Structure formats: structure tokens, C-alpha cells
Amino acid sequence: MRLRTPEALEEDAAAALASAADPAKYILGIDVGSTVIRCHVYDKAAVLKGSSAKQVEVLHPRPGWVELEPESLWTQFVGVVKEAVQAAGVQMNQISALGLSTQRATFITWNKKTGKPFHNFISWQDVRAAELVKSWNRSLLLKAVHGGTSLLHFFTRIDRFLLASYLNFTTQHVSLRLAWVLQHIYEVEQAIKDNNCCFGTIDTWLLYKLTKGVVYATDYSSASSTAFFDPFKLQWSVFLSKLLSIPISIFPPVEDTSFGTVDAEIFGVPIVVAALVADQQAAMFGECCFDIGDVKVTMGTGSFWDINTGSKVHASRKGLYPLVGWKIGKEVIYLAEGNASDTGNTIKWAQSLGLFSSAEETSKMAHSLVNSGGVCFVPSFSGLQIPVNDPYACTSFMGITPSTTKKHLVRAVLESVAFRNKQLYDIITRDVDIPPMSIRADGGVSKNNFVMQMTSDLINKMISKPACTDMSCLGAAFLAGLAVGFWNDREQLKKLRQTDMVFKPQKDLKEYEPAMGNWMKAVQRSLCWYSQTSQ
């Protein structure tokens, strides 16, 4: 592997810009999500000039396993970029730069010498490490860590010790899925011993492929999303490395500047890779949530609630995760995040059962009823996250009677999304000592007016929805555009953001209490389902 110096990367970027036959007039915003790869072509007014999208080919080789085949992902990625530029009616040499947003905590390892992967990408939704998570969270060693760091925090009042005192592993964390790989794939274990193993999340792998092995790196937002990163020291966690016996040497360098240029053979011209960013942080930036207290909720495959905590890392007592939102020069902005894994994929699953023909009709179906007829739905294909944290919880419908119709089932599914939103919002307001300012929503499910209105009612807050709901693409483009001078500053970006609709509370929370109470009972009865049946 050949690594480049920052100076050399800057020279490459300058050469790429200078080589364009026509003035560079456009920015690419690319998002490799959990279900779809999208590429948007934006002009200086942030107007979408052309786009392309393809479904991500997701593999389920065993129950609970979720994988992506790396070469298939790469082929799809290149195809989507080419199609988007063609759809925009522009030439590749008119592209100023590209920004790349990717799903987080989905990782791969590969041979440093040959570039050949040792296994498929293991998705953030994968629960193969559930037993390992359960074992670690019950271990005496982790209890000792909790006790020791709690004591240190009591005497020092240092937030880093407070964060460690609440450390609990989940299947979404890279840490124990990576530990599982080391335990079960001999080639990886041996490659680590031989100093011949590279680890990478999707951004790192695609950057490696785009530069034909020249650049091996990740950015701060993606690194912080692995749960193997120290947000206080802004480096890979030495503590977790020692605790889990995973050497830091396998992790990529973490950067916040130019990431080099795309090899000219791939798209015909070299293109500056000006930004790498994790998808939820990209959506936060695309929503222009630049101020402390700004909140965004992305409802895509899952639901992700993020609040801007400014320059301060939030050490949560309730399970919110501290993230680097973005690092631009010396400025570092942090977020606190809570999430639910199953949102858009639940609606897609319900569609596959024939409950409705298209997602667009679900809002009307739900609005046609006064209530769900006592039916409750628990969305838990990947377990339940905070405040429950049970990877063994099952997806379930409860309260079905002979009079239950498809409409009742659809309404119950949509209500479950709003109830999970309420849970996550409440955790943020109780745990973070920052009053929520503006709340902005994006993602495919934000197009569902029933979910949006019910969420607004439940949290008793106004929620703004943008004209374009693919905020990860726009956020990646914004970051790339700022990096190369395509846009001047964040004040300019705020003026470019367009609001489509604002949802205001219309019903009192008390009207929802009976339904949410029943839903909470359904959640309790869905817990520990798979661990019980497997005994």
C-alpha cells in the first residue's frame, strides 16, 4: 500500500481542477445507504440537476446475519455515479468535487498486500455477535470497569470517566462484531499477526477503490460512529483496544482534509474527493443544523435522532451515543444520538406482505381510521435499541381480532414509528442539558404525513420537512463544496435550504396515552423472545 502525504494530496486536487476542459460547475453528493445508493448532481444554487439510484444488494446468509458483497457494491457505486452525471446532462470534467456519505458501522477487512477482502461487509444491522454482546455486558470485567471509572468520575468530575462508567456493548457497535470476526475467521487473525490486515467501514473501502489503493483513510464522523473511537482524544480507543485485544494498527488514519482524487481511469477524469462523512452526520449538515440545540430526525431504514451539542462531548446516562458531527479545520462539532433500527425497512416488509401497493397510500389508509382497532406492532427485526436495548426482542403484531383489517395493520405499523420517535425524543430532552431549538426531519419516511403529524403531536413540537428529503446527499455535497470553495460559508448554505412543510401539534398527548400504553405492553411481551425459544 502506498500512502500519500497531505501536500501530495493537495497537489493532486489542484491538478484535477486545473485539468478540467470546462469550468467546474457542479458538485456530486453521493450516499451509500443501507438500502439505496444515490448520487445527486447539484449546481451552485443547490438545485438538483440530475440523479440516479440503485437498490443495495443485501445478503442474509443466516438468520440475523446481514451482509453486502464488496465487489457488487463497488460496481453499483460506479454505475450510479456515471448514470447521475449523464442524467444531469453534464460532463465529468465539469464536476468540481465529490462528497461521499455512507452508512455507518458496516465494515470489512482485507489483505493489505493484495487488496482482496477476507469476508463480505458485515452490516450495522447484523446481530451475529448478540451472544458475545450479552456475555460482555454481564461480565465481571465490565462491571469492574463500571465501578472503577464511576469512582474516578466521582473524584475528578471528568466526563470521559462518566462515559466509560456507562459503557455497554450493542450489536450495532463495530467492536464486538469485529471481535467475532477475529474469533471465527482464521485468515483475519493470521493477517493481523502478520501486519497484513486493513479494516475499513464503507467510506474507507470505497476511497481505497476510488484511488486504486493510494489513499487509505476515514474521517472523524465515520470513525466516531464505530464505537471504537475516543471522542475526547479524537483517536482510536486505546482502552477498547486493550480491553478487547484488537490492535489499533488495523484501523485507518483519521483525516479531515483532502482525501485525494479519483483515479482518472474510473470516470475518465480525476475528481477531487473533498469530503467523507457518515450518513447521519451528513444529514445533520444538509439540514443546516449548525447551532447548539438543533435537532434532526432521519427516518430512513431506521430512525436517528441527533442533537447538536456544540464543542462539548455529551456523556450520556441514558444510552445516547456521542458522535463527532464534523471536523472542519480546528472546529469540532459533536452530536448526541439515539436510534431505532427498524423504520423504513418495516414499511417495506409490510408492503411485501401485500398490506398495500405503494408506501404513498399508507398515510391515507391510516387517516381513514379513528384508531388501530387495538392492534399494536413492535418493529424489532434487528432487536430494540434504547431505552430497551434487547437484541433478542421479536417483531410482532398483537391485539389482532376477526374484525382486524389491512388498514388496522398498516396504521399499527405507522403508529409504532411515531411511538419510537416519542421515546427517542424524550430520552434526548431528559438526558441532554440543552433545550431543543429547531427540529427538522428527512429520510423517505418523512414523506408520510401521518407519521410526521403524529410525531409532532406526541412530542408537542413543530417539525420542519425539507423540499428534498435525501439530506445525506446534500450534506455530503455541502461539505465537499465548502472544502473546494464552491460555496463560501454556512450562512450561504442556510439560504439554499428549502422547507417544504412544517407540522404543528394538533392533538393533545392525552389522546394518544391509551394507544401508547397498549403499545408499551406489547413491547414488554416481545422482549427476550429469541433467547427464550433458543434455550
Image (cartoon, rainbow, N blue to C red):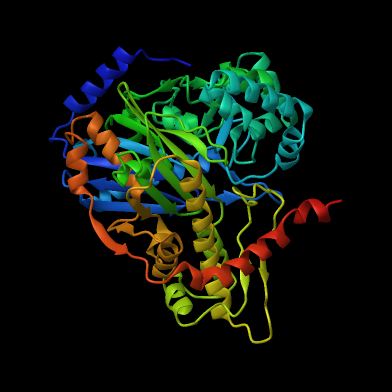
371 and 428: which is toward the camera: 428
The percent coordinates of residue 192 (x first, y second) are 65, 18
List the single residue furthest toward the bottom: 403
Q: Is residue 422 visible?
A: yes
For residue 473, above or below residue 450: above
Which residue does the image show at 32% across and 36% down from the upper left? 99
Image-quadrant location for residue 11? top left
List the single residue furthest toward the right: 535
The percent coordinates of residue 343 (x first, y second) are 52, 58
210 and 133: which is toward the camera: 133
Q: Is residue 348 visible?
A: no
For residue 175, above or below residue 61: above
Q: Would residue 17 be found to the left or right of residue 256 on screen?
A: left
89 and 478: which is toward the camera: 478
Q: How many numbered discs sit on the rendered protein?
A: 0
For residue 348, above or below residue 95: below
Image-quadrant location for residue 217? top left
Q: Would residue 477 be found to the left or right of residue 114 on screen?
A: left
Q: Would residue 153 be found to the left or right of residue 43 on screen?
A: right
The percent coordinates of residue 194 (x first, y second) are 65, 13
List the single residue furthest toward the front: 155
Image-quadrant location for residue 173? top right
The percent coordinates of residue 489 (x first, y second) are 19, 34
Which residue does the image show at 28% across and 31% down from the upper left? 271
396 and 371: which is toward the camera: 371
